[in-house]
Image (cartoon, coloured by chain):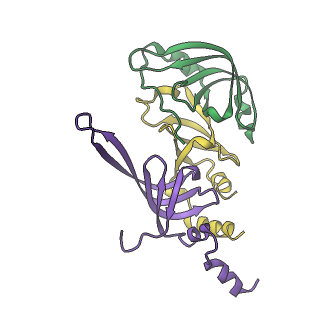
């Protein structure tokens, strides 16, 4: 295989997972089932969306109903995990690098 | 097979497996299979006061499908090697 | 390598099932297969609650379907025999939420 063809394969986006490949070593956003969100540096993934993230911040959002006003109260808790394997079956979406410091 | 190989390279290291029932089990990785079922030895359940269900269990088997996360030690992982392996696997 | 459970055969195991209610079933592991279906002989359920100590319910010979298994633990019988279950109180375990 010529080097040129190989380069094209490295950068071309033909299927969704190619976009994730381009996010390797970048900070990504992962939305999980059950109100969990992750932000961290992508180190590995596979076709099931099993993922390894480094320097992770997890945000868990719980909805509670106020007993008196019946209003929905959103409670978020955060925690930091230095290195995390995430099982793919819990992943809803993966968003490429967080731009502009968002 | 990327993560199967990945976890095989972590056998003997300490991990925390967080399950989908919110139980976190801390222990030494003893073995892993293709389904990412894990066997841990010398386990303790995190927050053991609240979760005293496995006080007499030192070795356990965890079904891969109930795993939410596995917390790893940064020192046990070569991120460059891991990213290269991921690129290699993705280009197959 | 579902053979991972081979060393547990004919030993007392503690199984955490996927539904929160059936918290711990202890018995002797008689057999298993690659989907982690289990055969447990002489099993009983340990029901945890906050209002009273652990209640033991005799179940006998049980086959549990692999899909409903979360954790299979090898029971250290020496430690287990020293535990005072009558005074052990705990919240029931959550069920597995996929």
The tally of labels here is 0
Q: Residue at x 50, y 57 (%)?
A: B74
Q: Position of residue B65 (x, y in %)?
A: 61, 43
Indicate the quadrant where residue C7 lies.
top right
Horizontal side, residue A9 vs residue A70: left or right: right
Indicate the quadrant where residue B90 lies.
bottom right
Q: What is the residue that sits farthest to the left in this orientation?
A: A68
Q: Is residue B48 above or below residue A9?
A: above
Horizontal side, residue A60 vs residue C93: left or right: left
| Residue nearest the observer in this picture, C71 or A13 | A13
Quarter occupied by the C terminus of chain B: bottom right
Q: Residue at x 63, y 14 (%)?
A: C59
Q: Is residue A83 above or below residue C98?
A: below
Q: Which chain is yellow?
A: B
Quarter occupied by the N terminus of chain B: bottom right
Q: Position of residue C65 (x, y in %)?
A: 68, 30
Q: Position of residue A33 (x, y in %)?
A: 49, 49
Chain C, colour shown: green
Q: Position of residue A23 (x, y in %)?
A: 53, 70
| Residue nearest the observer in this picture, A12 or C36 | A12
| Residue nearest the observer in this picture, A92 or B54 | A92
Q: Which chain is purple?
A: A
Q: What is the residue that sits farthest to the front in this orientation?
A: A70
Q: Residue at x 52, y 28 (%)?
A: B54
Q: Is residue B35 above or below residue C85?
A: below
């Amino acid at each position: 295989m010529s080097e040129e063809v190989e380069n094209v394969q490295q950068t071309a986006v033909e299927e969704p997972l190619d976009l994730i490949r381009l996010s390797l070593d970048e900070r990504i956003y992962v939305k999980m089932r059950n109100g969990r969100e992750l932000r961290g540096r992508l180190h590995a993934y596979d076709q099931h969306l099993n993922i390894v993230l480094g320097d992770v911040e997890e945000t868990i959002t719980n909805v509670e109903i106020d007993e008196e006003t019946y209003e929905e109260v959103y409670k978020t808790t955060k925690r930091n995990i230095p290195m995390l394997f995430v099982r793919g079956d819990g992943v809803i979406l993966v968003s490429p690098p967080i731009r502009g410091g968002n | 097979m990327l993560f199967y190989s990945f976890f095989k390279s972590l056998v003997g290291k300490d991990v925390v497996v967080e399950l989908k029932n919110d139980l976190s089990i801390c222990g030494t990785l003893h073995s892993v299979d293709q389904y990412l079922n894990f066997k841990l030895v010398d386990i303790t359940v995190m927050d053991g006061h609240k979760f005293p269900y496995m006080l007499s269990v030192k070795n356990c088997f965890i079904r891969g499908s109930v795993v939410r996360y596995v917390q790893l030690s940064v020192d046990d992982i070569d991120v460059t090697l891991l990213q290269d392996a991921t690129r290699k696997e993705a280009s197959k | 390598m579902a053979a991972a459970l081979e060393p547990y055969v004919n030993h007392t195991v503690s199984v955490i099932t996927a539904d929160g209610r059936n918290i711990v079933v202890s018995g002797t592991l008689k057999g298993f297969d690659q989907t982690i279906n289990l055969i447990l002989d002489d099993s009983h359920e340990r029901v945890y609650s906050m209002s009273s100590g652990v209640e033991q319910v005799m179940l006998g010979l049980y086959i549990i379907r692999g899909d409903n298994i979360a954790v299979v633990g090898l029971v250290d019988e020496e430690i287990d025999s020293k535990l005072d279950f009558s005074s052990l109180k705990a919240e029931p375990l959550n069920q597995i939420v996929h």
